[in-house]
Image (cartoon, helix red, strand yellow):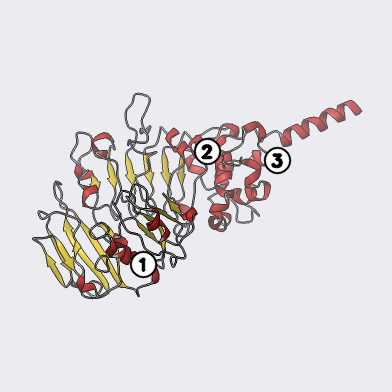
Amino acid sequence: MKYTLFVIIVLLTYTQSSYGQNKTKDYWVLVAFYLDPENEEIRPYFDKYRSNGISSKTTENGWQEMGRLFKFKDITDENGFLKPMEELPEVPGGIDNYDFVSKLGFRRYTNSTKDLSKQRVLKFNLSNFKLPPHSIKTLPQNFGDMDRLVMINIFPGGGLTELPQSFEQLKRLEFINLRENLFQRFPSQITKNSYSESVIKDDNGNSTLVYLNLSGNKIKYIPYDFFEDFYIRDECVLDNNALDIYELKKIKPSQNLSLRRINISNQKVIKNLTFCNALDTALIALPFDLSIQFDWILDSNSKSPLSCDKENNTVSFAEEGKYTCKVVVPDLKIKNYLYYEYRCKVIPINKDINALELMSLRNTGKLNWSQKIPLEHWEGVDFDESFNALTIDVSRKNLNFLVDLSKLKHLEKINLTYNPLTTSQFKKLKIPTSKIIW
C-alpha cells in the first residue's frame, strides 16, 4: 500500500512539473517577448485582452499567467537569448490542459494539432491588442525559433529600430507588416544587401514573400539595386519614409517586381539648419541637380525662401521657420513626389563656435567653419543639442595653426593626425593631452 501510494505521488509530481521541456519554443519566445523589460509598456494591454472563448470570469489570461509564473532573467541568458530547453523552468501541469495560444489571442493562428506540446504559431498578429504607438521596443533574440510563421503584423504599436538576427530563420513568411515602426535602414534580415542574403525563400530558392509594408518608418537608406534582386509577388509599400532623391534613384524596373506594385510616395527629408547670424547671408546648396523639377510650397505651415537660384542650385532664407520644397522624382514609370523640409533657426553665438571660427580663419580655405554656413554642415564637428562641440576631426586638413580650445568644456576628442603642426602649435590648444589624437 505504501509503495503504491509512493508511486502515485511520484507520477503526479512528474505530471505536474515535467511540462517545461514539452512546451514548444514558440511558447517560450512569447514568454520572453511579454516579459522583456524593454516591452514593459505593452503588458497592461495584453493583460486585459480576452480572446473569443475565454470567459470574462477567468481571473487570468495567458499573458498574466506567464507574468506570474516566470521572470525574464529565469528564461534568458545574459545576452537575452533563451536558455536551452532543458534549463527552462518547469511549467505547472494545469497550464498544459488548455490551448495556451487561445488564451494569448492567437486561437486562429496556430497549426491544428491535438497535441498541445507540438503547437506552433503561424501568424504573429498584434493588431487585436490596440497597443499605443511605439510601445513594442524589441523582439526576442530567439524570435526566429517560431519558424512556422507565415505572417508578421507589428502594427499598430511597433517601435522597432532593428530586427533580431534570428529573423533570417523565417523562411516561410508571406506577409510582413512593419508599418509605423522606427527603422532608419531597410532591415538587412529581410532583404539581400551587402551584409546578408535574403532567406525569405522556399526550399527551391523561390521567394515566398507576397506583401511587405514598411510605410511610415524613418528609412533613409535602401540597398543598392534592391528591386532588381528581391522578389515580392504582390506589393511593396515604402511610402512616408525619409528616402532622398539619390536613394529613390536606386529603384529601377526589373523582371521580378513591377513598379506599379511599389508605393514610394510622400517621402519627407527633414534638414535642420541652425545659424549664428542673419539667415540671408547664407546660400544653401540644393541636394539635387539642375534637371530636377521642383517648386516651393507656400501655405500656412511653410514660408517662401528669400531667393532660389535654379541656375546655381542654391537657396537662401529670410527668417526662422519651415520651408518645403516639392520635388518630382525622375526616371520612374509612375509620377512620385518627395519633399525636402528645411527647418531654420538662429541661435546665439557661444564660446565653442567663436573658438572654432577663429581656428577656421587662421587656416584660410581649409575649414568651412563660418557663420554663413549652418552648424549642421560644419565639417568634422559633432555638436550636442546645445551646440557645444563634443568631437572634432580635422585630420588630413593640412592645418598650420591652432588656437586656444580650453573654453570647449564639453570637448571629448580632437583628431589632428596628418597635419604639419609644430609642438608650439599644439601648446596653443591648452587642453589635456588625453583629448588629443596626434
In the image, residue 209 sits, relative to residue 138, either above or below, namely: above
From the top left corner, tell me how far across and down residue 2 is, in percent: 91, 28
Name which residue type carries label 1.
Ala
Determine the secondary structure under disc 3.
Answer: loop
Instruction: First in sequence, mark 3 or 1: give its number.
Output: 3
The answer to whether residue 1 of the structure is visible from this angle is no
From the top left corner, tell me how far across and down residue 148 is, in percent: 46, 34
- Say which residue label 2 marks: 142
Instruction: First in sequence, mark 2 or 3: give its number.
Output: 3
Determine the secondary structure under disc 2.
Answer: loop
Q: Residues within 10 Å of mark 2 (few under 14, many from 20)?
A: many
Q: Tag count in the figure?
A: 3
| Tag shown at residue 92 | 3
Q: Residues within 10 Å of mark 3 (few under 14, many from 20)?
A: some
Between tags 3 and 1, which lies in front?
1
Name which residue type carries label 2.
Asn
The residues bearing labels 1 and 2 have C-alpha atoms spaced at a distance of: 51 Å
Marks 3 and 1 close (CB-CB < 8 Å): no
From the top left corner, tell me how far across and down residue 427 is, in percent: 42, 59
Query: In the drawing, does residue 281 fall left or right of residue 377?
Result: left
What residue is rendered at 37% in x and 57% in y? 425
Between tags 1 and 2, which lies in front?
1
- Say which residue label 1 marks: 355
Name which residue type carries label 3.
Pro
Marks 1 and 2 close (CB-CB < 8 Å): no
Instruction: First in sequence, mark 1 or 2: give its number.
Output: 2
The foreground one among 268 and 41 is 268
Q: Residue furthest left?
A: 311
Determine the secondary structure under disc 1.
Answer: helix
Q: Residues within 10 Å of mark 1 (few under 14, many from 20)?
A: some
